[in-house]
Image (cartoon, coloured by chain):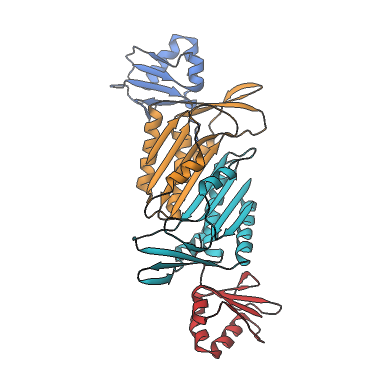
Chain colours: A cyan, B red, C orange, D blue
């Protein structure tokens, strides 16, 4: 499995293709998160993280997913730093012999990365900068697993 | 003990990390101690229900003991993904 | 939305990147199905389909997904004809402002494509050719929705 | 009426499609009629619970009426994806 925390941009399609190989692989699920400009006013998004803890937290979440489902591999890429609207923030991919495992594991990884990996988003518009607030729904989503 | 602050906690306190000499037995005691020091700490820690804490890079509770801990980090709920 | 039924190979990564654009997009989920060679004996897989009905059935499933979830777009590509082990058979992608919609819709599309789109798989090994049997689990999966 | 066969149904019956003149009122009556014709049909239709039917490219039941239908297709459960 592969966990990458980086400020550099990445190519989600190239990552998907590189990940999609291997004996016995039947099902690959990917998630890509994009900097969303809800009402066309976003100048930039800044992502802060906690170097060291970030990698540990993501690795622990991936390890958990690998024990819960029959996965052949998992990939997590998460950017930090300044990103523009429309840029990929992060990507998760899972592969398995069967689609149900690949889907559930990718969904689980996203829920946990969202609320348990130490990243914080700050949005800048013409009106200034604000830290994105965590949503109750994101915390509630963890209870599904 | 290295104490770190992230996101708006960092902005309110004004530094990303600092060395803190303390005899606090728990996270809550450390929060009280810091809040008593200066207004910027009191402002940052005004509502600890809006905060998370990590001890040596693992999420912990505010009543967790600090014995043996080298790094404490305070931050708002995560918003990654 | 885009539905393609084709014998030509496709590049899942390039498709994902082409699909991942657009205002207000925050979450993209993709599924890729690969010809799986369970025990290293598969010589080839042949996929038969019902031209005309295939496109109609997939379109109806996509339409259903678009009414159930807040999607900005959906993509379905499914190959027919002779495929080698390791080749992508099909791909589904969904995009939405929010990850929950993108995940649920992609999962739903896969469940319905599996059991309601008129494709049949035939596997050829050194021992001969056999039609892949439908699994009860695949039919049962439809009851989730 | 155009009658189509797919996958192993096609292989057992030996043709992918054929024009069938019938007065059958339902799919089940058509199945009976074809099964009575030749062994290859009887073999293909031996267990209709293992078969699916589409009328004018829409999935249907075996008791569905054939009035106005131009294309009937018989096939095993789908295995796409």
- Rendered location of residue B79, percent (x, y): 49, 65
C68 with respect to C34 (left or right): left
- Rendered location of residue B41, percent (x, y): 52, 84
Residue drawn at (55%, 60%), measured in percent from left and top?
Answer: A7
Q: Is residue B24 visible?
A: yes
Q: B74 or D63, which is in the foreground? A: B74
Q: Quadrant of the N terminus of chain C?
A: top left
Position of residue B75 relative to residue C96, above or below, is: below
Residue furthest to the right in view is B68
Position of residue C28 relative to residue C42, above or below, is: below
Position of residue B61 relative to residue D52, above or below, is: below
- Rendered location of residue D5, percent (x, y): 44, 19
B71 with respect to B52 (left or right): right
Residue drawn at (49%, 45%), measured in percent from left and top?
Answer: C30
Q: Quadrant of the C terminus of chain C?
A: top left
Residue furthest to the top in view is D38
Residue furthest to the front in view is A8
- Rendered location of residue A20, percent (x, y): 58, 42
Position of residue A29 relative to residue B71, above or below, is: above
């Amino acid at each position: 499995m592969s966990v990458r925390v980086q400020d550099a941009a990445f190519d989600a399609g190239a990552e998907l293709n590189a990940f999609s190989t291997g004996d016995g692989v039947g099902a690959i699920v990917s998630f890509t998160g994009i900097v969303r400009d809800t009402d066309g006013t976003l100048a930039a998004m800044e992502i802060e993280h906690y170097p060291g803890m970030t990698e540990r937290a993501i690795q622990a979440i991936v390890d958990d997913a690998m024990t819960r489902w029959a996965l052949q591999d998992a990939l997590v890429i998460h950017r930090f730093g300044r990103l523009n609207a429309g840029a990929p923030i992060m990507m998760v991919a899972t592969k398995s012999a069967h689609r149900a495992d690949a889907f559930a594991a990718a969904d689980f990884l996203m829920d946990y990365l969202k609320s348990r990996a130490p990243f914080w988003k700050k949005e800048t518009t013409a009106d200034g900068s604000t830290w994105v607030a965590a949503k109750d729904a994101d915390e509630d989503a963890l209870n599904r697993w | 003990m290295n104490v770190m602050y992230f996101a708006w906690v960092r902005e309110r306190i004004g530094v990303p990390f600092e060395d803190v000499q303390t005899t606090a037995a728990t996270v809550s005691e450390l929060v009280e101690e810091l809040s008593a020091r200066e207004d910027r700490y009191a402002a940052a820690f005004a509502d600890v229900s809006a905060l998370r804490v990590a001890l040596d890079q693992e999420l912990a509770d505010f009543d967790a003991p600090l014995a043996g801990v080298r790094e404490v980090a305070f931050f708002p709920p995560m918003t990654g993904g």
